[in-house]
Structures are given as C-alpha cells and as structure tokens.
Image (cartoon, rainbow, N blue to C red):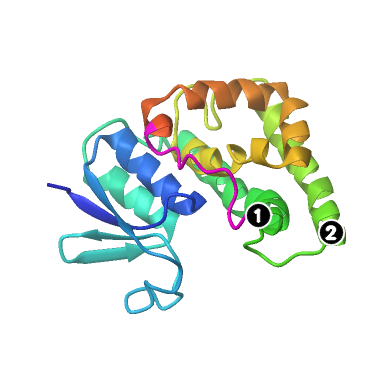
Amino acid sequence: MATIQIYGVPPSPFTRATRLAAREKGVEYELVPTRPGETAPINPLGKIPMMKHGDFTLYESPAIARYIDRTFDGPPLWPTDAKGSSLCDQWLSVVCDSMVQTALAGVIGPRFGIIPGTEEGIQVALKRSARVVGIFDKHLADHRFLAGEQVTAADLFLVPIFFYFPEIPELKVLAEASPNCGRWARDMGARPSVKATDPQFRGLNR
C-alpha cells in the first residue's frame, strides 16, 4: 500500500522531482494522474504536483521534497550541516528560478507547444539558457554533484529539466558543449530513481 499520493503527470518536471525524492528515500507512493487545474479544490493555484500523506496535504514541489526528506528514513536529500544545506538550497533556487525561466519556460515549453512563444523569444531564451548552463558546467568541473559529493534535492530538481535537452536540437547542442554537465547527467542517469521515473516522453502535442 502506498505511503503517500503524488498528484501530477509523468512529463511534468516538478512532478518528477517529487517522485525522485520519494524514490531516493525509498518511500512507496501512488502517482495519481492529475493535470494542472484539477488540483484547484486543494491548491488554489491549480498547479501540480500536490501530495497527500494521510489527512495532510501539501503543494509546491520544494516543500513536498523537504517534507518527504524530514518525515521518512533514508539517505538525506539535504546535507545535515549548515553550509551544505545552504548550498543545496542555493542550487535548488537556481534550478527553480534561472533554469526554469530560461530553458524550461523559454525554450522547452514553446518548442513542445505547451507554452505560447515566438521564435524571437525562443532565441533570446536560448542565449540566456547558455549563460545559465555555463554556470552549472563551471561549478560541476570541481564538484561531482551540485551541493558536493552526494546527490541532493538540487540534483533531483535539475534532472527533469536537463534530461529534456536532447529533445530540443538547440539545447542538445548546448548540452553537448557542456562536458561537466554531461558527466553529471551520466551519473544521474545511472541512478535507479532516475530510470524508474523516466516518462519515456518524446514531445508533447507533436
């Protein structure tokens, strides 16, 4: 029997991030197919994912991941020391802000036809994406994972976005020109949690 229920759809990057958190912690979960807008009775923003644990409900994916980490046994998703935890939060914020605004909302969404966009806007977003990916690539030259030598929540939130790069020709070129990100992606791709949550997705509305 599932311990928690996660409401969302497999292609959703933030739904996948919470599923990755559960998998890494060894928490049994049920994925309840739910599209944006269908969570409105509980989440006034109508967004996915949402989580239920008994009679407790929670939305916003970083909050869900942190709840899973604090509630259940298993490898910590946030380092236990102040500096390590803060670095994890820093890179998690960079993913959820800069990477989302540039690559996800600016390129991936429009290219897949799920977010409105113009070709001019996509080209601007690609240039911004290159700068953001460059920051990740430079950092990963000296670190195995984003917050150090162990996988943390920051890595789990980057996976669902970066692993869509091969689907977009321009982003694929960008990824191939970022060797440290590529090494990180290979390490992450070998993890059972990443394999188990692969949406086997080759484009929305195409």
**Where is mark 1, residue-wise?**
112
Left or right of residue 91, residue 168 in this image: right
Residue 28 lies within the magenta run: no
Residue 57: % across, % down:
26, 65
Which numbered circle lies on residue 119? 2
Q: Magenta residues?
A: 196-206
What SS does tag 1 mark? helix
Residue at image x 66%, y 60%? Answer: 113
Residue 166 seen by the camera: yes
Amino acid identity at mark 2:
Glu
* Pick the front one: 63 or 17: 17
Q: How far apart are marks 1 and 2 (CA)?
A: 13 Å
What SS does tag 2 mark? helix
Contact (CB < 8 A) between labels 1 and 2?
A: no
Q: State whether residue 189 is above or below residue 55.
A: above
Furthest residue to the left? 1
Q: How many marks?
A: 2
Q: Quadrant of residue 49?
A: bottom left
Left or right of residue 169, residue 123 in this image: right
Residue at image x 62%, y 62%? Answer: 114
Residue 202: % across, % down:
57, 43
Q: State whether residue 36 is above or below residue 206.
A: below
Furthest residue to the right? 120
Amino acid identity at mark 1:
Phe
Give the dominant element type of the magenta stretch: helix, strand or loop: loop
Residue 206: % across, % down:
63, 54
